[in-house]
Image (spheres, grey):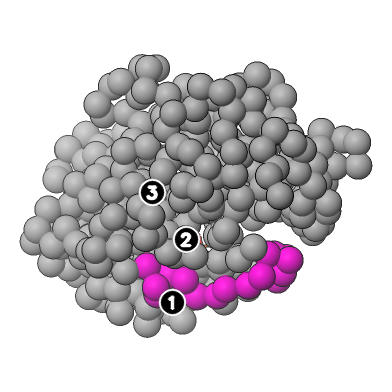
Amino acid sequence: MDTTGKVIKCKAAVLWGPHQPLMIEEIEVAPPKAHEVRIKMVATGICRSDDHIIEGFLKTSKYPVILGHEGAGIVESVGSGVTCVKPGDKVIPLFLPYCGECRGCTEPKSNFCRKSDIGKNTGLLSDHTSRFTCKGKLIHNFICTSTFTEYTVVEETSVVKIHDDAPLDKVCLVGCGFTTGYGSAVNLAKVEPGTTCAVFGLGGIGLSVIIGCKVAGASKIIAIDTNSTKFEKAKELGATECINPKDYDNPIHEVIQQMTEGGVHYSFECIGNTDVMVSALLSSHVSCGTAVIVGVAPSVSILSFSPRLLLPGRTLKSALFGGFKSKKCVPELVTDLIAGRFNVDSLLSHKLPFKEINKGFDLLRKGESIRTVLEF
Ligand code: COD
Ligand code: ZN
Ligand code: ZN
């Protein structure tokens, strides 16, 4: 049945308010307006940032909301004026949009498009409305994507066509976790061959940083986590040493300094903990080290350290999505993945049917999963 131009009724996971389980509800998804695209989701990953909103650590969006920002699907229909994709195309929604016109898009070193809803937290599309309703209520959109639904509507600036052969259950990770970590190593830090790296936090993001450090040719990759069960995967992906801060009496940055003759070239914080951000800074070499903050700290946090830590020449940097311009890098990374340049299989720890989404969040909270991919 042709659904073009019609309202679609489908199932979605609705978050009615913080600290609540997601509810599988029947929702209505309006047809795409001009420059919008309606997508039939095929797979979506559960990212820690979605959990932060459920748990109320991150103040973002408005409730009720359909979360999810790491997914892949097939275009169902397009609104007028859309030329970048057509019905039937395999696509990845982009939580970091690319309009191609704003300062964030035109500056070569920036990737933060002004159309992003991160920090604005309107929970709406550009025309200040949403395409979702449930039980007569407006349901908000989440950072330009909302992938925890059988159908979603995004703006053309928030979607990109990918290779026809892409396995959607794997490449959905390119929509956030893999790209954020991998890009932080190869694009933001620009790790060079023969350098030393330290990666704090071995979830999906930290493990993707390790993949990037290895592809870039780092000679030493130290993996740090308070949960030693994460070490096996870290080693499999390229960590040369794994250390647990609980096994040492002295602070972990001192241990890393001793292991690396004064500190690593590149350190990465992939947890979202401000104390660990300072540890990562101290673990980087005093005059040639770079610390990269990848994790997102709770909205109220303040990072506090002496500016003298930077004075001798240390660098502290951060960016969303590995600093990549989303529309350009996502199709390239998908093609690289198909070509076998890297492998995301070991990040994909669990697969569940979409309806078991709350079980997927439980696995993440218990530290048992790396990435759970939900299939529709
Ligand atoms: N010291 C060492 N390891 C620790 C500590 C500590 N003090 N505390 C926790 N850990 C370990 C945990 O055991 C766990 O293994 C790991 O840190 C964190 O992993 P996860 O699985 O919780 O999280 P990830 O890998 O999914 O990472 C998510 C981030 C925490 C980095 C989160 O902030 C994020 O998704 N950042 C991406 C930034 C971004 O672009 N966000 C916008 C859309 S996501
Ligand atoms: Zn994410
Ligand atoms: Zn832009």
Q: As drawn, is 176 to the left or to the right of 56?
A: left
Q: Quadrant of the C terminus?
A: bottom right
Q: Are marks 2 and 1 in contact (CB under 8 Å)?
A: no
The image quadrant of residue 268 is bottom left
Q: Is mark 3 within 8 Å of ligand 2?
A: no
* Residue 261 horizontal/vertical position (percent): 13, 63
Q: As drawn, is 351 to the left or to the right of 165?
A: right
Residue type marked 3? Ile
Report if residue 88 is visible in the image.
Answer: yes
| 348 and 283: which is toward the camera | 348
Residue at the disc numbered 2: 168
* Residue 65 horizontal/vertical position (percent): 74, 42
Q: Secondary structure at mark 2?
A: helix
The 10 Å Cα crowd at callout 3, few under 14, some 14 to 19, many 20 or more, is many
Would you say residue 114 sits in the magenta stretch? no
Mark 2 or mark 3, which is nearer the start of the sequence?
A: 3
Residue type marked 1? Lys
Residue at the disc numbered 1: 230
Report if residue 304 is visible in the image.
Answer: no
For marks 2 and 1, give the one nearer the viewer. Answer: 2
- Furthest toward the right, the residue is 135
